[in-house]
């Protein structure tokens, strides 16, 4: 081995080692049935997004650091049942965005957004497990609504009630506002595909009353399917093992393997074999099948012709 080849081979070996330990993410799937716009199950928001795109400009952010792209005065940010909140820095940034005229809608019956709600003087009360009808007052309009597993909202100005219990409240923050709804499933696919579709849609459009609706999807738990190039990195190893297995055997069985491997390689690589096979295929394809008449011998001339074609092909292959 020449000295010039040593660095090249070393780099190749290093590349194979690094490649064998790499993990390439292919796609990420959601865990459970969250109110995510990417979830097409009963608990997802895919139906809402499909409808909203007709009336609004729908956007998605995985980080609240990206809110600066959207004009606060014409945008509404939606946090729907996140598994975990973003960092405190991102929360403060989102609230500053609201103060400049933005609108934030929080849809959640769990206590995950508690730190955010505490900053605006809102908290959640007892959980009501069941489906109930209620009413929301938004502006000068009243909207009936269906709530599915919801919490009492304490603080702010109530805007939705179920049997006199406030389940949504609004808070003014600077030039903007925050609306907290104690139900993350208020607009899920199960409801949007039911007979309550029109009722929930009217409420959704009234609540998301800005030109641009931005959904925050960064707080989801997900499982990532990964691909490891380790298999590709091992290809040279397996090729070498195969060559050693075929060529370096000592028993008669190994000799048979060598012969078989040689015949297979010649059959694939030999141009003469390919030419003979092509000729055989053309001659056979040119032969027209004729139905044997009653009384003809079972071994007909057509069969003999086929045998002759086969013999010629074998002769050319061996010659």
Image: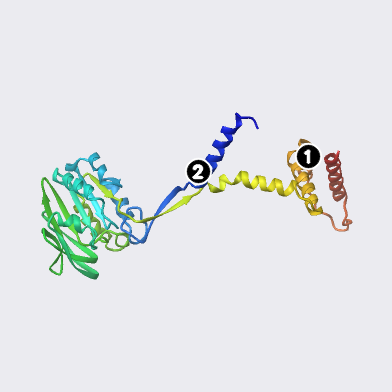
* 232 versus 185 height, above or below: above
In depth, the one of 219 and 282 nearer the eye is 219
Residue at x-position 77% and y-position 37%: 275
Residue 178 shown left or right of residue 58 in the figure: left
The percent coordinates of residue 146 (x first, y second) are 23, 64
Q: CA distance from mark 1 to mark 2?
A: 42 Å
Residue 208 shown left or right of residue 10 in the figure: left
Residue 138 seen in the figure? no
Q: Secondary structure at mark 1?
A: helix
The percent coordinates of residue 210 (x first, y second) are 20, 46
Residue 277 shown left or right of residue 215 in the figure: right
Residue annotated with mark 2: 18
In depth, the one of 118 and 253 nearer the eye is 253
In depth, the one of 317 and 207 nearer the eye is 317
* 135 versus 258 height, above or below: below
Residue 259 seen in the figure? yes
Q: First in sequence: mark 1 or mark 2?
A: 2
The percent coordinates of residue 239 (x first, y second) are 65, 45
Q: Name the front one of labels 1 and 2.
A: 2
Residue annotated with mark 1: 273
Residue 118 shown left or right of residue 288 in the figure: left
Residue at x-position 69% and y-position 48%: 242
Residue 83 figure quarter: bottom left
Q: Secondary structure at mark 2?
A: helix
Residue at x-position 88% and y-position 58%: 295
Q: Quadrant of the N terminus?
A: top right
In depth, the one of 21 and 224 nearer the eye is 21
């Amino acid at each position: 081995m020449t000295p010039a080849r040593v660095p090249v081979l070393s780099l190749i070996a290093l590349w194979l080692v690094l490649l064998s330990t790499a993990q390439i993410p292919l796609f990420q799937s959601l865990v459970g049935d969250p109110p995510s716009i990417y979830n097409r199950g009963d608990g997802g928001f895919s139906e809402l997004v499909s409808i909203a795109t007709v009336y609004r400009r729908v956007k998605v952010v995985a980080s609240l650091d990206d809110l600066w792209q959207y004009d606060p005065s014409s945008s509404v940010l939606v946090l729907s049942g996140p598994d975990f909140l973003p960092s405190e820095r991102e929360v403060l940034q989102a609230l500053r965005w609201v103060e400049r005229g933005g609108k934030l809608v929080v849809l959640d019956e769990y206590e995950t957004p508690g730190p955010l709600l505490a900053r605006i003087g809102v908290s959640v009360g007892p959980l009501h497990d069941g489906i109930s009808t209620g009413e929301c007052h938004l502006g000068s309009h009243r909207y009936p609504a269906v709530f599915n597993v919801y919490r009492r909202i304490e603080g702010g100005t109530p805007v939705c009630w179920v049997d006199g219990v406030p389940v949504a409240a609004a808070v003014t923050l600077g030039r903007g506002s925050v609306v907290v709804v104690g139900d993350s499933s208020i607009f899920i696919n199960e409801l949007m595909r039911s007979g309550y579709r029109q009722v929930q849609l009217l409420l959704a459009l009234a609540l998301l009353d800005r030109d641009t609706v931005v959904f925050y999807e960064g707080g989801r738990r997900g499982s990532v399917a990964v691909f490891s190039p380790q298999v590709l990195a091992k290809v040279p190893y397996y090729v070498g093992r195969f060559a050693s297995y075929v060529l370096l055997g000592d028993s008669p069985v190994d000799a048979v393997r060598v012969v078989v491997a040689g015949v297979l390689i010649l059959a694939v690589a030999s141009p003469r074999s390919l030419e003979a096979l092509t000729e055989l295929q053309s001659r056979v394809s040119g032969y027209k099948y004729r139905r044997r008449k009653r009384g003809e011998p079972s071994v007909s001339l057509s069969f003999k012709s086929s045998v002759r074609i086969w013999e010629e092909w074998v002769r050319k292959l061996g010659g």
